[in-house]
Image (tube, rainbow, N blue to C red):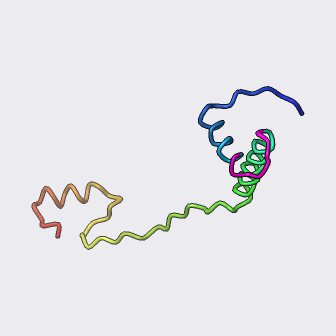
Amino acid sequence: MRTTMTIDEDVAAQIKKKRIGGIGKTFKEVVNETLRDGLRFAAEQDRKPKRKFELKGRLLRSKMPFNFNKVHQLVEIIDEGHDLK
């Protein structure tokens, strides 16, 4: 397939640098090789199972003499001046 695209200067510089390290590779070959590597890597990342986030709950127990679901009990204890410890 033949197409026209604009390559950023920094990307072109990296491709040219990779091309110099390769033996007789053309700019086109290096671009295609790099794209294949990137696409292969992305596909591998998609196949990896995602770790689920798990939150473990814990029952909170109180040493205070009231039920947290009954706020009026807490208010009464505070109004009577009891120590909450």
- Which residue sits furthest right? 1
Could you tell me residue 56's position as x and y percent?
49, 68
Q: Position of residue 12 (x, y in %)?
A: 66, 36
Quarter of the C terminus within the rendering: bottom left
The residue sitting at 69% across, 56% down in the picture is: 45
Residue drawn at the location 69% of the way across and 62% of the way down? 49
**Residue 80 magenta:** no
Q: Position of residue 3 (x, y in %)?
A: 83, 28
**Residue 14 left/right relative to 44:** left
At 26% from the left and 73% from the top, the residue drawn is 63
The quarter of the rendered structure image containing the N terminus is top right
Farthest residue toward the left?
Answer: 81
Magenta extent:
20-27
Secondary structure mostly seen in magenta is loop
| Corner quadrant of residue 84 | bottom left
Q: Total number of numbered labels? A: 0
**Closer to us: 63 or 7:** 7
Tell me if 64 is positioned left or right of 50 in this view: left
Q: In which quarter of the image is residue 59?
A: bottom left
Is residue 21 rendered magenta in the image? Answer: yes
Q: Which of 46 and 66 is in front in this view?
A: 46
Q: Residue at x 65, y 45 (%)?
A: 17
Vertical comparison of 63 with 41: above or below: below
Which of the pair 41/73 is nearer the observer?
41
| Figure quadrant of residue 83 | bottom left
Q: Position of residue 21 (x, y in %)?
A: 69, 51
* Left or right position of 61 against 31: left
Q: Which of 17 and 53 is in front in this view?
A: 17
